[in-house]
Image (cartoon, rainbow, N blue to C red):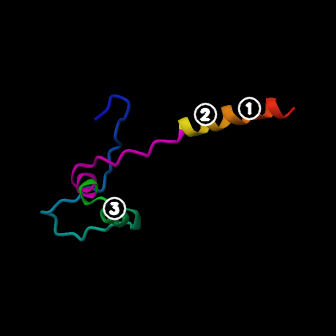
Amino acid sequence: MSQYYIGKYTPNIYDPKSSESFQLSRSRSELFMSCPKCFYIDRRSGVVRPPGFPFNLNSTVDAFLKKEFDVLSE
């Protein structure tokens, strides 16, 4: 993984040898539907899916253009 991202450890890891039932949350079932491999890594290894990246470039360009057009409209 990246040097900038440190995954969180999740304590609810699936153990196939356990006789207890394993409960899943709604968000974990949605994770399975969107990415089965991410779900497997999350539940067996405890490595959560990395967060999505914000739209910093889009926000910066938008702020820059608004500032420039505000100067022109005065």
Q: Secondary structure at mark 1?
A: helix
Who is closer to the viewer here, 7 or 38? 38
Instruction: State which quadrant residue 58 falls in.
Output: top right
Instruction: Identify residue for label 3.
Output: 34
Residue 53 among magenta residues: yes
Instruction: State which quadrant residue 59 falls in.
Output: top right
Left or right position of 23 against 58: left
User: Alpha carbon of mark 1 to alpha carbon of mark 3: how far?
Assistant: 39 Å
Residue 6 location in percent, x, y? 35, 36
Left or right position of 23 against 19: right
In the rendered view, tell whether residue 42 sits above or below residue 7. below
Q: Secondary structure at mark 2?
A: helix
Residue at position x 18%, y 59% from top?
15
In the image, what residue type sits under mark 2? Answer: Thr
In the image, what residue type sits under mark 1? Answer: Lys
In the rendered view, tell whether residue 52 sits above or below residue 30. above
Residue sitting at the far front: 72
Residue 10 location in percent, x, y? 33, 50
Specify the label residue 47 is tagged with: none
| Between discs 1 and 3, the one toward the N terminus | 3
| Between discs 3 and 2, the one toward the N terminus | 3
Callout 1 touching callout 3 (CB < 8 Å): no
In the image, what residue type sits under mark 3? Answer: Ser
**Which region is colored magenta?**
39-55
Q: How many marks?
A: 3
Residue 3 location in percent, x, y? 33, 28
Residue at position x 21%, y 54% from top?
44
Residue 28 location in percent, x, y? 35, 62
Residue at position x 31%, y 52% from top?
11
Residue 47 among magenta residues: yes
Instruction: Identify residue for label 2.
Output: 60
